[in-house]
Image: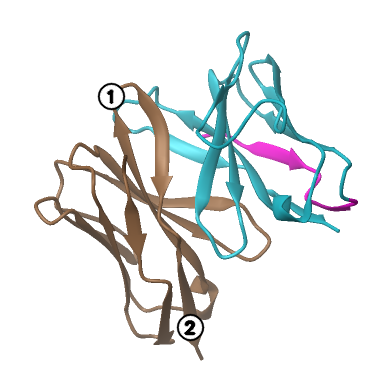
Chain colours: A cyan, B brown
Amino acid sequence: SAVISQKPSRDICQRGTSLTIQCQVDSQVTMMFWYRQQPGQSLTLIATANQGSEATYESGFVIDKFPISRPNLTFSTLTVSNMSPEDSSIYLCSVETGGGGWGTEAFFGQGTRLTVV
Amino acid sequence: GEDVEQSLFLSVREGDSSVINCTYTDSSSTYLYWYKQEPGAGLQLLTYIFSNMDMKQDQRLTVLLNKKDKHLSLRIADTQTGDSAIYFCAAYSGAGSYQLTFGKGTKLSVIP
């Protein structure tokens, strides 16, 4: 299993500013994932962050808007840049254990509830 | 790509069984998951089933998989007020893809 600490747990930000969300895992993991959960919606994958390489972004998400750092195997940050009210969401960090084979499990942080005013 | 659908709401009386249904579209999905999200919390993995299984039981939870119809269900026996939460179905294709595809979640309300 993996225990994920994510902070801040919530924030209220002014439009045009940026917020950096931190994700700390209690064990070394190869891949970390960032999801967005908009109000009343499911989870949408923003990007996959591998240590030592550029993050891989899903369609509709770009690095300029959501820069990601992955300095080591236990930590990652997601920045929401130049925020607008449409960015108000819950942002979730996730890791997977099991290497994609049988028993692969995904674990999530408690999420960061972002409100942009 | 994968599409996962769930009904959005379910209301049951305490002590009754709850059945939450999910359908998915990608027949190559190898692992299927149920997550629980309580208010203000992240997602908690409840259980998962491999695609070569029809059923998995874990205490009060029973997962049924109909691979032919691409239908997954989660049954919660003796539902308690503490089971009130949003339940997400998720599908994972594996084969080098590390992306989980989530349904929109079913909000379970348990009436005392």
Which residues, given as a range, are shown in magenta? A1-14
Amino acid identity at mark 2: Val
Packing grade of label 2 (10 A; few <14, some 14-19, many >=20) is many
Residue B8 spot, x, y in % from top left: 43, 72
Between the C-alphas of marks 1 and 2, the distance is 38 Å
Along the polypeptide, which appears first: circle 1 or circle 2? 1
Residue B110's label in the rendered image is: 2
Q: Is residue A111 left or right of residue B74?
A: right
Residue placed under numbered mark 1 in the picture: B95
Q: Position of residue B100 (x, y in %)?
A: 41, 40
Q: In the image, are marks 1 and 2 on the same chain?
A: yes
| Spot occupied by residue A23 in the image (x, y as percentages of width and height) | 71, 33
Tag 2's secondary structure?
Answer: strand
**Chain that bears disc 1:** B
> Nearest the camera: B65 or A64?
A64
The mark lying in front, picked from 1 and 2, is: 1
Assess disc 1: are there few (<14), some (14-19) or many (≥20) residues with their C-alpha within 10 Å of its C-alpha.
Answer: few
* Number of numbered discs overlaid on the protein picture: 2
Q: Residue at x 60, y 10 (%)?
A: A53
